[in-house]
Image (tube, rainbow, N blue to C red):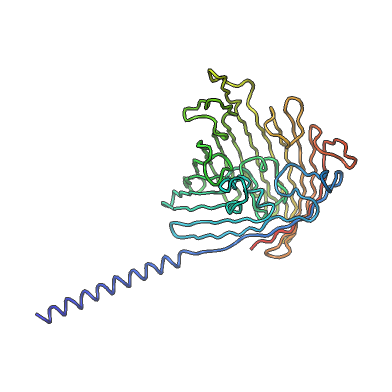
C-alpha cells in the first residue's frame, strides 16, 4: 500500500511539473511576442515673411496650424510609448512645446480651462485584436480624416494645409476596424464631439466611418463624420429650452496617394464640411433658424519627386473656400461670409542622416479678399513666406 501511495504521489508531482513547465513556456512565448517600444521626434524652425511684418503685434502668418511663429521657433517634442502584444496593446503619445499645445487645444477641460496633465496627451488608447478581421480601439486617437497629420515626421511639407488645420485633430471614443479583404477595409466609430478629448462635457456624440482601398501602388480612403458639436440638441434632436443650436455638422473627406513611378508620387485630399443652420427657441416654440448651412470645402494636390537618395522636392497646391461665414479669421470674407484662398507650398526634404531631415520651404497664400497686411501695414490679399525646419525622428 505504501508503495502504491508513493507511486501516486510521484505521478502527481510529475504531472504538476509538466503542467508548470508548460505554463512557463506559454508565458515565455507571450513575453517574446509582446514588446514595449519608444519612438518620437523633435523639431524646430525658422520663419520669415517677404511682403509682411515680422515682429510685434503686426506679425502675421497664414491661419493654418503649427508653423506660424516668427523667427527661430520651437515645434514640439513627441514621445510615444507603444506596447504591442499578440492580441492586445496600448499607445501613450505625449507632446510638449508650441506645436503640441496647438494639437491638443481641446484637452485642458479637466483642469477647469487651465493647463493640466491632459494637455500633453496627443493620443492615449488601448486596442484588442478580436480576430484576424476585427480590431477594437478605445481612447483618444488622432483623426482619420485628411491627408496630413500632427507629427512633422509623417508630412512632406512642414507647414500644414487649410483643410487639415480646420478639420478634426483628434477623437475620443470607440472604433472598430474590419479587414474586409487584402485590399478593402472598413472602420466605424462613435466618439465625443470633435476635439473634446478628455471626456464628454456636452452629452452628444459624433459618428464616423472610413472605407479604405490599398494596393502596393498606393491607397485611397473615404471618410465621414456626423454629429451635434455644440451639445444644444436633446436626445430627440430638438432644441433644449432657452438655447440656440448651430445644428449638426457633416464632413466627407477623400484622401489618396499613389506612386506614379519609382521617383514620382501624387497625393490628393478633398473635403466638404457643413453645419446646418440649426434651431432657436422663441419662448413658446422651437423654430428652424433662417438661412442655409455654413462651412467650408477644399482640394489639395501633393506632387513629390525624389532627385536622389538624400533629397526630394514637393509641391502642394491647395484651394480652400469658406461659405456663409463657416469659419472666422481663416480667410478674408466678403459681406456674405464667403471667401477663398489658393496656397502654393514648395518644400524640399534633405535627409542629413537616418534621423535628421532639413525642410526648406517657400509658401504663397493668395486670398480672394483682403486678409493680410503688407510691409506698409496696408491691406493685402497675399502673403509670401520662407521657412527652414529641422525634424529629428527616433
Q: Is residue 135 left or right of residue 366?
A: left
Quarter of the image with the N terminus in it: bottom left
Quarter-of-image position of residue 376: top right
In the rendering, at what x and y percent does residue 26 appear? 37, 67
Quarter-of-image position of residue 384: top right
Is 335 situated above or below 179?
above
In the rendering, at what x and y percent does residue 305 appear? 73, 52
Tell me if I can see residue 26 in this picture.
yes
Q: Is residue 148 left or right of residue 57?
A: left
User: Which residue is at a point 68% across and 36% down the rendered structure image?
Assistant: 298
Q: Residue furthest right?
A: 376
Quarter-of-image position of residue 169: top right
Tell me if I can see residue 311 in this picture.
no
In the rendering, at what x and y percent does residue 290 appear? 63, 20
Count all numbered tags in the image, as a single digit: 0
Q: Nearer the viewer, residue 345 or 248?
A: 248
Quarter of the image with the C terminus in it: bottom right
In the rendering, at what x and y percent does residue 108 appear? 60, 47
Is 3 situated above or below 58?
below
User: Which residue is at a point 52% across and 27% down the rendered structure image?
Assistant: 240
Amino acid at each position: 500500500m505504501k508503495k502504491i501511495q508513493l507511486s501516486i504521489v510521484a505521478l502527481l508531482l510529475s504531472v504538476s511539473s509538466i503542467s508548470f513547465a508548460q505554463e512557463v513556456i506559454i508565458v515565455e512565448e507571450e513575453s517574446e511576442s509582446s514588446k514595449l517600444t519608444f519612438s518620437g521626434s523633435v523639431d524646430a524652425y525658422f520663419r520669415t515673411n517677404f511682403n509682411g511684418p515680422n515682429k510685434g503685434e503686426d506679425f502675421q502668418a497664414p491661419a493654418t496650424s503649427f508653423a506660424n511663429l516668427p523667427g527661430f521657433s520651437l515645434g514640439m517634442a513627441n514621445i510615444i510609448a507603444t506596447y504591442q502584444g499578440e492580441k492586445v496593446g496600448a499607445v501613450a503619445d505625449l507632446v510638449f512645446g508650441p506645436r503640441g499645445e496647438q494639437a491638443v487645444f481641446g484637452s485642458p477641460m479637466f483642469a477647469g480651462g487651465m493647463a493640466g496633465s491632459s494637455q500633453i496627451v496627443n493620443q492615449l488608447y488601448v486596442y484588442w485584436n478580436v480576430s484576424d478581421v476585427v480590431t477594437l480601439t478605445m481612447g483618444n486617437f488622432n483623426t482619420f480624416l485628411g491627408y496630413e497629420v500632427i507629427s512633422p515626421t509623417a508630412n512632406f511639407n512642414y507647414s500644414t494645409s487649410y483643410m487639415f488645420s480646420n478639420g478634426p485633430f483628434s477623437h475620443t471614443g470607440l472604433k472598430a476596424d474590419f479587414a474586409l479583404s487584402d485590399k478593402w477595409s472598413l472602420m466605424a466609430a462613435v466618439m465625443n464631439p470633435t476635439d473634446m478629448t478628455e471626456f464628454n462635457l456636452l452629452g452628444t456624440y459624433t459618428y464616423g466611418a472610413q472605407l479604405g482601398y490599398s494596393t502596393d501602388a498606393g491607397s485611397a480612403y473615404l471618410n465621414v463624420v456626423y454629429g451635434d458639436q455644440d451639445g444644444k440638441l436633446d436626445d430627440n434632436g430638438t432644441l433644449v429650452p432657452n438655447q440656440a443650436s448651430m445644428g449638426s455638422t457633416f464632413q466627407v473627406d477623400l484622401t489618396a496617394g499613389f506612386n506614379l513611378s519609382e521617383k514620382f508620387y501624387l497625393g490628393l485630399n478633398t473635403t466638404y464640411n457643413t453645419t446646418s443652420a440649426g434651431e432657436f427657441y422663441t419662448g413658446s416654440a422651437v423654430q428652424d433658424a433662417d438661412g442655409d448651412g455654413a462651412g467650408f470645402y477644399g482640394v489639395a494636390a501633393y506632387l513629390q519627386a525624389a532627385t536622389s537618395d538624400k533629397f526630394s522636392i514637393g509641391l502642394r497646391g491647395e484651394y480652400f473656400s469658406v461659405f456663409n461665414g463657416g469659419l472666422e479669421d481663416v480667410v478674408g470674407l466678403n459681406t456674405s461670409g464667403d471667401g477663398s484662398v489658393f496656397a502654393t507650398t514648395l518644400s524640399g526634404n534633405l535627409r542629413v542622416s537616418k534621423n535628421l531631415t532639413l525642410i526648406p520651404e517657400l509658401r504663397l497664400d493668395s486670398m480672394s479678399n483682403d486678409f493680410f497686411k503688407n510691409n506698409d501695414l496696408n491691406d493685402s490679399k497675399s502673403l509670401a513666406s520662407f521657412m527652414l525646419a529641422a525634424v529629428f525622428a527616433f
